[in-house]
Image: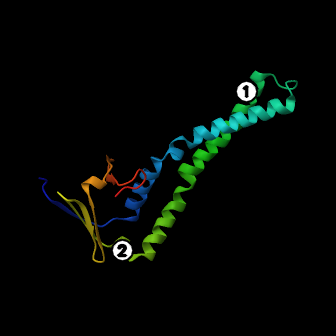
Amino acid sequence: MLETVTLNVQFTRDDYLRVLRFMTSQSFIVKYGPPIAFAVLFLFIFGFILFLSDGQLFSIPAALLVSFFPAAVASGAIYLVDRHVSAPFLKFSIGKQMKSNPLFEKEVTITFDDGGISTATSHSSTSINWEGIIRAVETETDFLFYTTNKFAY
């Protein structure tokens, strides 16, 4: 039998942003997108150079070298845009959602007990059984309880 633990919290925009960034960072495309983009671009450029030169203009080692740099720059740009340039837009979007829905700014009561996890605000409540949680992750600042491979509670 578990002890019942109840927490009263008020989440901020930074809390939502931090958790959203963590959850999206766990997806396959975010983890492996830049290396996959590099490989695809490299092979495309390499094949294109060999096709155009018909083996006359570039040797294979030269074509490999010439293909590497544009592919590295393009995949580096994808990485920078994904990880750094999009961050202010995400913060703005979450802020806009919080302003449009006052429930985001309300205090939330979270209860952990034998039945699972329950949350309640002044307007709504929800709960999930422990069997519905497929994975739990602890970060430096948060506990995330996944109910699907991509969604944490």
- Looking at the image, which residue is at 53% across and 49% down? 83
Q: Mark 1 highlights which residue?
A: 64
Looking at the picture, how far across and down is residue 17, in whole percent? 43, 59
Looking at the picture, how far across and down is residue 102, in whole percent? 38, 76
Residue 117 or residue 77, whichever sits in front: 117
- Looking at the image, which residue is at 88% across and 24% down? 56
Q: Is residue 85 above or below residue 7?
A: above
Work out how far the residue at label 2 is from the one at label 1, CA to CA, in angstroms: 55 Å
Q: In the image, what residue type sits under mark 1?
A: Leu
Q: Mark 2 highlights which residue?
A: 103
- Residue farthest along the front direction in this orientation: 131
Label 2: element kind: helix
Which image quadrant for residue 68? Answer: top right
Q: Is residue 55 above or below residue 21?
A: above
Residue 10 appears left or right of 41: left
| Label 2: few (<14), some (14–19) or many (≥20) C-alpha neighbours in 10 Å | some
Task: Evaluate whether residue 137 shows in this view.
Answer: yes
- Looking at the image, which residue is at 52% across and 46% down? 30
Which image quadrant for residue 77? Answer: top right
